[in-house]
Image (cartoon, helix red, strand yellow):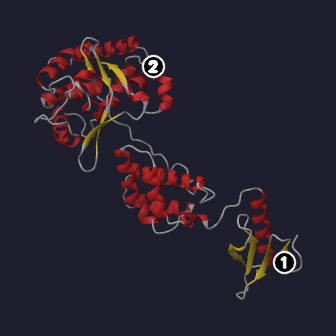
Amino acid sequence: MANKKGRRRDFGSVRQLPSGRWQVRYRDPETGQLRPAEKTYTTKTDAQVALTHIESDIARGQWSDPDAGAVNFEEYATAWLRDRKLADRTRERNESVMRLHILPTFGAGSVADVTTARVRSWRGKLLAAGVGEPSVVKAYQLLRALMNTAVDDELIRRNPCRIKGADRYDVPERPVLTVAEVFAVADSIAPRYRLLVLLAAFTTLRFGELAALRRRDVDLEGLIVTVRRAQAELQDGRLFDKAPKSAAGVRSVSFPAELLDTVTHHLEHFAAPGRDGHVFVGPQGGQLRRSNFRDDWVKARRDAGVTAELHFHDLRHTGNTLASTAGASTRELMTRMGHSSSRAALIYQHMTSDRDRAIADRLGAMIRDGGGGASG
């Protein structure tokens, strides 16, 4: 209880300032020195209630130093990104998101200045300015991860990124091609890229995984392609091969026997020489680059008469749908696609090569029924 002078034992006190407002002073549990509270109050009663709450927080071990979050946000964010263990491409993307979407709003202030209200306002302004929802979601996720670390570092008590639904968005339904449409696109593209289209659809490999394939990754006898790496491109244009994000990304995927002649023809005429040569290369023999391939893709898509909204990655979605139609279970399907989650890798790793062969065989039957050719 407070005595007549407003003192609360030896813990702290309240006093009236010349302005007429009431100030709370309490003993810092770390230094033992009296310090003023962050706020002042209109009445003595309000100040005494605040003092009671501070004392209670300290007794429960829930008090945090109000000055702890006073560190500059940009300096803290820069050090946080620097110290994270990230792949080069991921680091580049995160630095770009931080620079373009987060620092302009929060960089000049302190970590403690980031409140839920400010986060909500910041997110709304990004969307209103026409920033794509996927980019806004990525920025929110990055800010939330940063502020989680600030909580762990005891700079703030609670993460201000608590906006329901802000960490996800509804992905629009992507187009799914028929087998005949897949072959129409493959037959419309430059011959050196025909197999690229067919493998994307019937093995569901990603563009980066296809671009990183070497001759030694293709087993003509077993009708299998093995994913060991994926191509990535930095903002300065450098290409490099990296390990998949998880153990599940390293996988062997069966392709339909109906594609064997096409695979053989491609290796004979278009792949780089040597056992370690890339399966897919550009017209001059250099590594396949997504930006250079885009014009060929757009033209083939147009010449084949398929939807103008079709992205190359939609071939993976098409293959996923076709394999599901062929009878693949969820576990088999996700294993075939190389799910990026380590948890999913454990769940889906039980798929056998015989079952994968059966899926590829049924895809082959779809190719025959759909009238797709297999010649080079």
What residue did someone put label 2 on? Answer: 329
Residue 295, how many percent across, how many down? 17, 41
What residue did someone put label 1 on? Answer: 6
Q: Are marks 1 and 2 in contact (CB under 8 Å)?
A: no
Rendered image quadrant of residue 202: top left
Rendered image quadrant of residue 306: top left
The residue mark sitting in front, 1 or 2, is 1
Label 1, label 2: how far apart the Cα atoms are:
72 Å
Rendered image quadrant of residue 257: top left
Residue most extreme to the front: 31
The correct choice, above or below, for 48 with respect to 152 in the image is below
Residue 332, how many percent across, how many down? 43, 20
The correct choice, above or below, for 134 with respect to 17 in the image is above
The C terminus sits in image quarter: top left
Can residue 20 be seen from the camera position used here?
yes
Q: Amino acid at mark 2?
A: Ser
Of 208 and 184, the residue lying toward us: 208
The local secondary structure at tag 2 comes to loop
Residue visible at 48% across and 55% down in the picture: 143
The correct choice, above or below, for 98 with respect to 230 in the image is below
Residue 361, how many percent across, how many down? 32, 12
Of 289 and 323, the residue lying toward us: 289
Of the two numbered discs 1 and 2 on the same chain, state the one appearing first in sequence: 1
Q: Residues within 10 Å of mark 1 (few under 14, many from 20)?
A: some
The N terminus sits in image quarter: bottom right
Horizontal side, residue 142 vs residue 35: left or right: left
Q: Residues within 10 Å of mark 2 (few under 14, many from 20)?
A: some
Q: Amino acid at mark 1?
A: Gly
- Looking at the rendered structure, the number of numbered marks drawn on it comes to 2
